[in-house]
């Protein structure tokens, strides 16, 4: 469960105070795939950074499964991001000299999981997102864009996160592959019992979500 209460983020740009996120309140239940939609400059990337504990709000609260992450110390935030939040990026952000399996193992290694358990879970996750054993042994350069995004999704699931944040997850994919990835995210939200929030400018993706939030000038609109 994700709860955001009166969230505000301001920046100083020269002599001007920029209100990037303006008193946003929203809620996404566990197991739900949701989207935040808005044009460039609407504040959606800033909001995603706040939800992912990559930046601190000026005011307001962010609750994930009743834990208030906006008030955690820097050390606890690092641990929380590593263990409780998964990220999926438009550019995949895979390590090019590692295989698909090894890429998925990376977050588990940082979390201190035993090597054998890392390999077993990585293989299970990659199979779950549709990559067979042969492709699991390939490096990203030998995988298609859709396959690389599947690896990125499996990596995001590695540490059984409470929250997955996806930044334009289909931005580099054709429409057919993008639709497959969105369906995969929707299914995984249910099967993995995790909350998924995807930022997008694509109305077609938003139409597939169970909940859609529209952002304009940092404010939620109807």
Image (cartoon, helix red, strand yellow):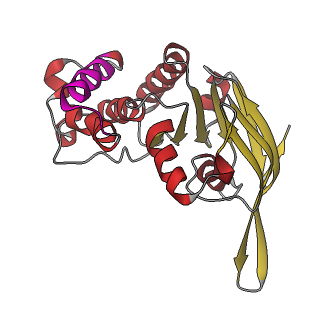
Magenta stretch holds residue 117: yes
Q: Nearer the viewer, residue 41 or 150?
A: 150
* 116 in the magenta segment: yes
Measured as percent of width and height from the top left, residue 28 is found at 70, 29
Task: State whether residue 47 appears in this view.
Answer: no
Number of numbered discs: 0
The spot of residue 14 in percent (x, y) is 71, 85
Residue 80, placed above or below residue 13: above
Left/right placement of residue 138 relative to residue 153 reads left
Q: Quadrant of the N terminus?
A: top right
Magenta segment: 112-127
Q: Quadrant of residue 194?
A: top right
Residue 75: image location, x then y, percent: 50, 56
For this rendering, which residue is in front, 136 or 208?
A: 136
Q: Main secondary structure of the magenta part?
A: helix
Could you tell me which residue is drawn at 32 percent across and 32 percent down? 151
In front of the other: 57 or 210: 57
Q: Nearer the viewer, residue 156 or 150?
A: 156
Taking the image as shown, residue 2 lies to the left or right of residue 88, namely right
137 displayed left or right of 189 = left
What residue lies at 55% left-to-right and 18% top-to-bottom?
193
- Residue at horizontal 54 percent and vertical 59 percent from the top: 74
Look at the image and tell me whether residue 20 can be seen: yes
Q: Position of residue 51 (x, y in %)?
A: 63, 46
| On-image quarter of the C terminus | top right
């Amino acid at each position: 469960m994700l709860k955001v209460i009166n969230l505000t983020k301001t920046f100083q740009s020269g002599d001007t105070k920029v209100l990037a996120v303006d008193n946003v309140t929203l809620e996404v239940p566990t197991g739900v795939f949701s989207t935040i939609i808005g044009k460039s400059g609407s504040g959606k990337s800033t909001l995603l950074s706040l939800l992912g504990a990559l930046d601190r709000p000026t005011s307001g609260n962010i609750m994930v499964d009743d834990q208030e992450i906006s008030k955690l110390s820097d050390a606890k935030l690092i641990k929380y991001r590593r263990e409780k939040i998964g990220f999926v990026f438009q550019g995949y952000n895979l390590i090019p000299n590692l295989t698909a399996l090894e890429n998925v193992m990376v977050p588990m290694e940082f979390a201190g999981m035993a090597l054998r358990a890392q390999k077993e879970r990585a293989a299970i996750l990659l199979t779950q997102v549709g990559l067979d054993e042969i492709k699991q042994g390939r490096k990203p350069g030998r995988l298609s864009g859709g396959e690389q995004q599947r690896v990125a999704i499996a990596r995001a699931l590695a540490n059984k996160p409470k929250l997955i944040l996806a930044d334009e997850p289909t931005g580099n994919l054709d429409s057919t592959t993008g639709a497959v990835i969105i369906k995969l995210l929707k299914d995984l939200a249910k099967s993995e019992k995790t909350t998924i929030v995807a930022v997008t400018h694509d109305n077609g993706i938003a139409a597939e979500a169970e909940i859609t939030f529209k952002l304009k000038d940092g404010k939620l609109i109807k």
